[in-house]
Image (cartoon, grey):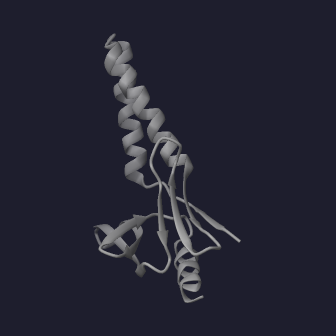
Amino acid sequence: MNRIFHARIAIGQYLFLLLVTGVAIWALWDKHIVLAVLMVILLVLGIEKLIHTTYTLTSDGHLVLYYGRFMKGKTISLQEITEVERVCQMRLFGVGLMRCVLVHHGNKTEALMPVKEKEFIDEINKKRKL
């Protein structure tokens, strides 16, 4: 049975959407049509990626990273995964602002942000041992 984990939206992604929305509104207001169209396209692509990003652990032993309809996904074999760790990338006054799960496979590392981090790590480790 496949297990699907949805991605968490970080504060920086919200700020990016607000910035792009502000530039798009300003460009429309000031009649810069080309810039407005580009910002609206960027806004649609960004929202699509945020809403549809999922991490799927398949029953046949793969981790499928899906980033929406317009972005290329990735499939990683669970046998290739060497380590899975939970890290805080950005700290302010000792408080972790941005948490993520690092998945090391081969010579590469993927930074993932599942909503239920502990369950995600436990599920990967459980499926790797099978």
Q: Considering only vertical position in the picture, is 57 above or below 48?
A: below
- Report the quarter where the C terminus lies: bottom right
Q: Quadrant of the N terminus?
A: bottom right
Image point (38%, 44%), residue name: 15
Q: Tell me the residue at 37%/51% (across/down).
A: 12
Q: Looking at the image, which is closer to me, 10 or 55?
A: 55
- Res. 57 image quadrant: bottom right
| Residue plotted at (58% across, 82% down) | 127
| Residue in the image at 37% along x and 20% along y | 36
The percent position of residue 8, horizontal first and vertical second, equals: 51, 58
Q: Is residue 27 left or right of residue 64?
A: left
Left or right of 50? Residue 4 is right
Furthest residue to the right? 1
**Above or below, comparing residue 26 to residue 60 in the picture:** above
Residue extending farthest to the bottom is 129
User: 29 and 42: which one is in front?
Assistant: 42
The spot of residue 101 in percent (x, y) is 43, 71
Frontmost residue, 13 versus 129: 129
Residue 114 in the image: state x and y as whole percent. Answer: 51, 65
